[in-house]
Amino acid sequence: MPSASATPSAFASGSPVRVVSLPDSYREHRMSSDGPFVVLDEIGSADDALASSIVLVDLLGGKWRTLATAASGYHPWTPLIRGDQVAWVEWQYEQPPASGACRWRIVAMNTATGRKWIVASGVNTRLEGLGAPPPPIALDGADLAYAVQDTTASRPWGWRVKAVDLDSGQMLREIATDEEVYGFGLSGGSVAYSEGLVDSERGFVYRTRLMVSTTADPAPRQVAADAFEVSFRDGQLAWVADVESSQKQSGLQRTSRVWTATGPSWTPLAVTPQMPTATTEESWPAAAAGSVSFDESDVTDASRGVPTLWLWSARTGQAEAVPGSLGAILSSQGAGWLTWAGGLGDSVTVSGVAN
């Protein structure tokens, strides 16, 4: 394993930005963080030996390591971390790399004890394009939510959301969705998800809407239309809305905009104040109490289309660019840290700052 490096640099608040370098060949897919600890998976296929593990980055320690390797023939997907708990999906397709039915398993691991176990498993057979999608998952402390395909005559694209206590194994609640799940989040027992219709030939979701189900009001209610990516943490809900992509069934990002809301009213508040132009893309929000981070790229400004991380504050109602984040394509927040992954050129770095 190549040696890791940690390079502090100045941050506007006075806190140092911690940077850990990954191999140039690493292909980050999704990230999640809790404090200075970050987990990532790679883009790849089920038969790609270079993309079969979950990586854990320690920003304070300035190092990284392989946390876990997927079962033989499986590909790890969308890892999440909260304290000592880590969870991820492993999938294997009937026709590799990603066609046909999807055999899946949800794996949890306690980093303090090293215990690893399978929370749930199954096979998704309802196709979204060439292949069936793996289940979405969300983690909040020791509570894990996931969704399984649940087709009925009245809900041909329906899923069933299940929330479970990882410590006891107790099922906490279940929610039936009306349509295909796209984005997914869990916070304080409340579940948020975006859902929509499916273009089964081209394999994408459209005419979407954002739904919230709380323990006090379990019947899912619509919060917003045209929502896609979702982040939900510390009661702060954030999402990307794209009216043109959703309504015109394009399957491509068109005019994305970041929004946020908190309960109990769940009234949408724009994080990015104006509708972007076709030259601007805003995506992958990460929510935490009182703040939302997101990456933005604009081919018309000095960055020449290179993505930059922005942080919105509920206190000021403004979003500011994060110094040292040029090239960031993913971000996460939690336990007092802001973290991001990306890089310029061939570099692949994971960075973070205590905020």
Image (cartoon, rainbow, N blue to C red):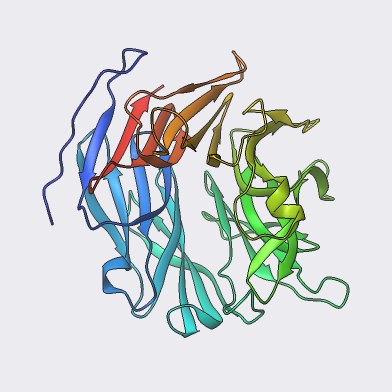
**Quadrant of residue 353 within the rendered picture:** top left
For the residue pair 207 and 33, the one nearer the viewer reads as: 207
Q: Position of residue 110 (x, y in %)?
A: 38, 53
**Quadrant of residue 292 within the rendered picture:** top right
Q: Quadrant of the C terminus?
A: top left
Q: Quadrant of the N terminus?
A: bottom left
Residue positioned most to the bottom? 95
Q: Is residue 242 left or right of residue 50?
A: right
Q: Position of residue 141 (x, y in %)?
A: 52, 43
Q: Position of residue 263 (x, y in %)?
A: 75, 31
Q: Is residue 50 left or right of residue 240?
A: left
Any part of residue 194 in sight: no
For the residue pair 116 and 179, the one nearer the viewer reads as: 179
Residue positioned 18% across, 34% down in the render: 6
Residue positioned 41% across, 29% down in the render: 337
Q: Position of residue 18 (x, y in %)?
A: 26, 30
**Quadrant of residue 52 within the rendered picture:** bottom left
Any part of residue 99 in sight: yes
Residue positioned 40% across, 58% down in the render: 109
